[in-house]
Image: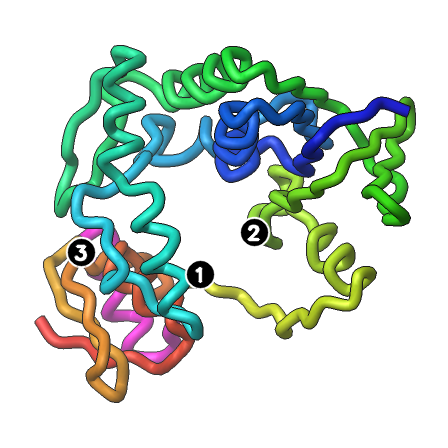
Amino acid sequence: MKNYDVIILGGGAAGLMCAIAAGGRGRRVVVLERANKVGKKILMSGGGRCNFTNLHCDPSRFISANPNFCISALSRYTQWDFITLVEQHGISYHEKTLGQLFCDDSSKDILDMLKAECMQAGVAIRTDSDITGVSKNEHFEIACQDASFTAESLVIATGGLSIPKMGASDFGYGLAQQFGLKVLETCAGLVPFTFSGAMHELTERLSGLSIPGCLSTANGEQAFTEGVLFTHRGLSGPATLSCQVIGVPVKKST
C-alpha cells in the first residue's frame, strides 16, 4: 500500500494541471493513468498543434446550469496565467482566429511542459494503471492490478464519453454513482447536422465550402459567429458545433 496526500485518476490535461497545483502546495501527489502514456488527447488537439487557450476566455462565453462556477473558476486561474506558463517554457505560439492560440510547432510542446511542471512539483505519474476498485474508510483506497494506493483526497479526472478509441469510458460516472452522487443522463454533445432529400443534395454539392455565419439558439439568447462548413452530409464547423453544445434547436443567418 503506497500512501499519498492526493490521488488523481486520469492523466489528461485536467489531471495534470490539478497535479501541478496540488504538488506546488507541497502535497504528495500521484497520477494514475490507464493508458500507456499521459496526455493522448492533448497530442491530437488542434490538428496536432494544440489549441491551448483563447484570448477572449471569460465567464460570459460559457453556458452552464451553474454560471457562478465559471466565474469562480476563471477568476482563480485565467488564460493569461496559462499563457505566462507557456512563455516561461519558451513555447512559440500564434493566434489563428478569434483569439484561438495554437503552438507554432507541435502539441507535444504543451504535453512536455505539463510533464516538466509535474516533475518539478514532485508529482509521481504511473501509466498502465488499470483500476480494479475504489473504496473509502478513513481514507480513499485505490486498487490497481499491480499495486494499491491510499490518500486523504481523491480527484476524478477521467474525462467523458467522447472518442472511445482514445480510451474514453464511463468510469467517472460509475464512480460518482458508487458514492451516491447524482449523475445526469448523458447524451452526445458534438454531432454533425445531417440532411436528406434536397438539402442533402445541396450540401453535397457545396461540400468543402466554408462561409462566415451566425448561429443562434431558437430563443435568441445565445449566438455564435464563426465558420459554417458544408460537408457531404450536412453542416459542420466551429459555429455549428458551438450551438450544438447548448442542446437546443438553432437557426442560421448569414
Question: Which quadrant, please, contains the C terminus?
Answer: bottom left
Q: Is residue 203 magenta?
A: yes
Q: Nearer the viewer, residue 218 or 93?
A: 93
Q: Tag 2: residue type?
A: Ser
Span of residues in magenta: 193-209
Identify the residue shown where x is 20% and y is 23%: 93
Question: Which quadrant, please, contains the N terminus?
Answer: top right
- Tell me if residue 254 comes above or below residue 5 in the rendering: below
Residue 83 visible from this viewpoint: yes
Residue 122 location, quadrant: top right
Q: Which mark is residue 227?
A: 3
First in sequence, mark 2 or 3: give its number.
2
Residue 39 visible from this viewpoint: no
x%, y% of residue 66?
43, 71
Q: Where is mark 1, residue-wise?
A: 190
Q: Where is mark 2, residue-wise?
A: 162
Callout 3 environment at 10 Å: few (<14), some (14 to 19), or many (20+)?
Answer: some
Q: Is residue 253 magenta?
A: no
Q: What is the C-alpha distance between the residues marked 2 and 1?
A: 9 Å
